[in-house]
Amino acid sequence: MSELLSLLGIAGALAVGTVTPGPSFVMIARTAVAAGRADGLAASIGMGIGGVTFTLLALIGLQGLMLNLPLLYFAFQIVGGGYLIYLGLRIWRGATEALPETLTPRVVSRHSLARALVLGLATQLSNPKAAIVYAAIFAAFLPQGTTLEIGSLIVVLVFILETGWYALVTLAMSAEGPRLAYLRGKSWIDRLAGGVMISLGLRLALYAESPGGG
């Protein structure tokens, strides 16, 4: 029973964190409306893989490395912030690029799907604070001596939560209505999305601090 309650607590805490808008949401929403449903779903899987990566780091205790080596954690924040700024600049520069007005599904290539998956994974991993958040949640809800079976369930749970949420965002944003609205205001929407990415990256990089910092 205690393990079930622990899993429910972890699921609730992670669900709240997952659905909170951030750079991942911006990237998935834009990918879905600009590149299509298939690419959006591939990027969602990348998000799930990123969440699993943070989960495994937390479960095996590697987040302690960043806690004990503040300079390493600081470097991760700088790199993550730099990536978000780079991604925001790319979106901003592409604001004036035209997209097809038709909603006819385009031919989806493996290269395109792989690129979208890597984009989702890289965006998820660009925020090293997520590793600390995962560790904090597990420390709060997981009892000591957690079995391999429970650990495996947590990994599956994280993948389902992360991938499932962003898949829902993809399905909603790739529908005809949102896509047509995006096409009508593409330049402004892309500039807004790029600006959000840049501001989040600047915030992460400029206010980088050690895990124990104030």
Image (tube, rainbow, N blue to C red):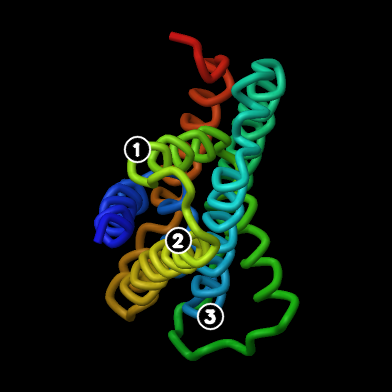
In the image, 194 versus 100, the foreground residue is 194
Up/down of 21 relative to 168, above or below = above
Q: Earlier in the sequence, mark 3 or mark 1?
A: 3
- How many numbered tags mark residues here? 3
Give the residue pinned by disc 2.
Answer: 154
Identify which amino acid the numbered label 3 is placed on: Ala
Label 1 SS: helix
Q: Earlier in the sequence, mark 2 or mark 1?
A: 1
Label at residue 168: none
* In the image, farthest residue toward the top: 214
When asked about the image quadrant of residue 168, the answer is bottom left
- Quadrant holding the N terminus: bottom left
From the viewer's perspective, tell me whether residue 147 is left or right of residue 176.
right
Give the residue pinned by disc 3.
Answer: 38
Residue 183, percent across and down?
40, 67
Residues at marks 3 and 1, CA–CA distance in whole angstroms = 37 Å
Q: Are marks 3 and 1 in contact (CB under 8 Å)?
A: no
* In the image, farthest residue toward the front: 145
Residue at image x 49%, y 54%?
A: 27
Identify which amino acid the numbered label 1 is placed on: Ala
Residue 121, percent across and down?
61, 57
Mark 3 surroundings within 10 Å by alpha-carbon count, few (fewer than 14), some (14 through 19), many (20 or more): many
Identify which amino acid the numbered label 2 is placed on: Ile
Residues at marks 3 and 2, CA–CA distance in whole angstroms = 27 Å
In the image, 74 versus 101, the foreground residue is 74
Q: Earlier in the sequence, mark 3 or mark 2?
A: 3
Residue at image x 36%, y 58%?
A: 185
From the viewer's perspective, tell me whether residue 151 is left or right of residue 29.
right
Residue 175, percent across and down?
33, 79
Label at residue 140: 1
Label 2 SS: helix
Residue at image x 31%, y 73%?
A: 172
